[in-house]
């Protein structure tokens, strides 16, 4: 895939962690003239910081920031943000990175997570918002080539103790994107490419939270040991691999590609 095109790029959870690095690295590779970058997160100060860092290296790029709480976001919020950032421009490609995510309450066992108020908020943040944003993205960028990326995880395909919340939303979210890839692959235009990218275990606030709160001591220890041994990856390492995966383009639409999959 040739990333150096006039591109619309939207990244959720761009204020820190993996999303921040993805936004910065992709912004450097797309064609500056005519491209647009939209950064979403809750923390406006951090989003402005990311915007400043991008503009310091690519001053000609149009970069927009939007503070949005995904726990309560509605379809019309996504429509407004997409329409506002897209403006009247035309693009060679539109990219959406569904990166924002939360790990849930890892102190609880699977048999203890039945609080429907919590489940509704948690699923809204991690599943419903991503689906709703994606539907608006597909509608508003109809007719131009699209790349849809979902930040997946090993936890979407394998059960992990302490992670009942997280495993279930990640599995649901990945299946949504697989169905999307199947349907769009059957469509006559076939202009949508979908990637479920599992970034490996990364040193971010999310993994710190698991290490601190997991009820299963073996899970907490696994995170702690990887951090202490420095075998945990950095956001820069996984972003570099992600960009190589895109450039090599060996995956099929809808595939689950892990950081460690050598063939990609
Ligand atoms: N870290 C890992 O080892 C790992 C492994 C596999 C997959 N992943 C996936 O990679 C993605 C990023 O993870 P990360 O480790 O970078 O996480 P992180 O450091 O905790 O960052 C999460 C991002 O999501 C945003 N966010 C969180 N809750 C939000 C909400 N309610 N509304 C709007 N935005 C919200 C945060 O922005 P604000 O605070 O500004 O809202 C932040 O930018 C997630 O989907 C995660 O499941 C991570």
Image (spheres, rainbow, N blue to C red):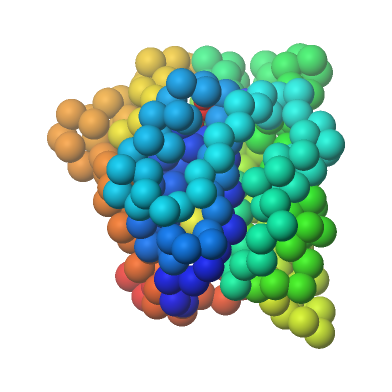
The picture quadrant where one finds residue 80 is top right
The picture places residue 36, in percent across and down from the top left corner, at 55, 53
At a point 66% along the width and 60% down the height, the residue shown is 89
- Residue drawn at point x = 31 percent, y = 58 percent: 240
Q: Quadrant of residue 48?
A: top left
Residue furthest bottom as drawn = 188
The residue at the point 37 percent across, 49 percent down is 59
Up the image or down, 207 lies above or below 156; here it is above
Image quarter hosting the C terminus: bottom left
| Picture coordinates of residue 140, whole percent (x, y) | 78, 57
User: Is residue 72 visible in the rendered structure shown here?
Assistant: yes
Residue drawn at (76%, 73%) of the image: 143
**Image check: 170 left or right of 143?**
left
The reply to whether residue 160 is visible in this rendering is no
Is residue 78 rendered to the left or right of residue 49? right
Q: How many marks?
A: 0
Vertical arrangement, residue 160 with respect to residue 179, above or below: above
Q: Is residue 27 left or right of residue 89?
A: left
Residue 171 at x, y percent in the picture = 65, 47
Q: Is residue 64 left or right of residue 205?
A: right
Can you give x and y, in whole percent of width and height, for residue 185 in the image? Answer: 73, 77
- In this orientation, which residue lies closer to the viewer: 210 or 134? 134
Nearer-the-camera pick, 59 or 229:
59
- Of residues 264 and 244, the one nearer the viewer is 244
Q: Does residue 193 sit above or below 135 in this rendering? A: below
Relative to 127, residue 102 above or below:
above
Q: Residue furthest left?
A: 229
């Amino acid at each position: 895939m040739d990333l150096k095109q006039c591109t619309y790029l939207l990244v959720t959870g761009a204020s820190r962690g993996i999303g921040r690095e993805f936004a910065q690295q992709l912004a450097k590779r797309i064609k500056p003239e005519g491209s647009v970058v939209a950064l979403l997160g809750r923390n406006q100060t951090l989003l402005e910081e990311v915007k400043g860092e991008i503009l310091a290296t690519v001053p000609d790029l149009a970069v927009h920031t939007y503070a949005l709480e995904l726990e309560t976001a509605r379809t019309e919020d996504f429509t407004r943000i997409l329409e506002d950032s897209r403006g009247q421009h035309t693009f060679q490609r539109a990219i959406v990175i569904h990166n924002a995510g939360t790990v849930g309450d890892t102190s609880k066992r699977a048999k203890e997570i039945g609080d429907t108020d919590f489940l509704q908020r948690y699923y809204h943040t991690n599943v419903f918002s991503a689906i709703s944003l994606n539907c608006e993205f597909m509608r508003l960028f109809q007719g131009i080539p699209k790349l849809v990326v979902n930040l997946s995880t090993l936890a979407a395909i394998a059960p992990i103790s302490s992670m009942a919340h997280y495993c279930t939303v990640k599995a649901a979210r990945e299946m949504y994107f697989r169905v999307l890839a199947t349907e769009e692959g059957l469509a006559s235009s076939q202009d949508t490419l979908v990637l479920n990218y599992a970034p490996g275990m990364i040193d971010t606030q999310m993994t710190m939270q698991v290490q601190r709160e997991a009820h299963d001591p073996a899970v907490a220890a696994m995170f702690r040991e990887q951090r202490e041994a420095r075998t945990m990856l950095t956001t820069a390492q996984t972003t570099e691999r992600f960009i190589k995966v895109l450039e090599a383009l060996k995956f099929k639409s809808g595939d689950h590609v892990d950081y460690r999959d050598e063939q990609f």
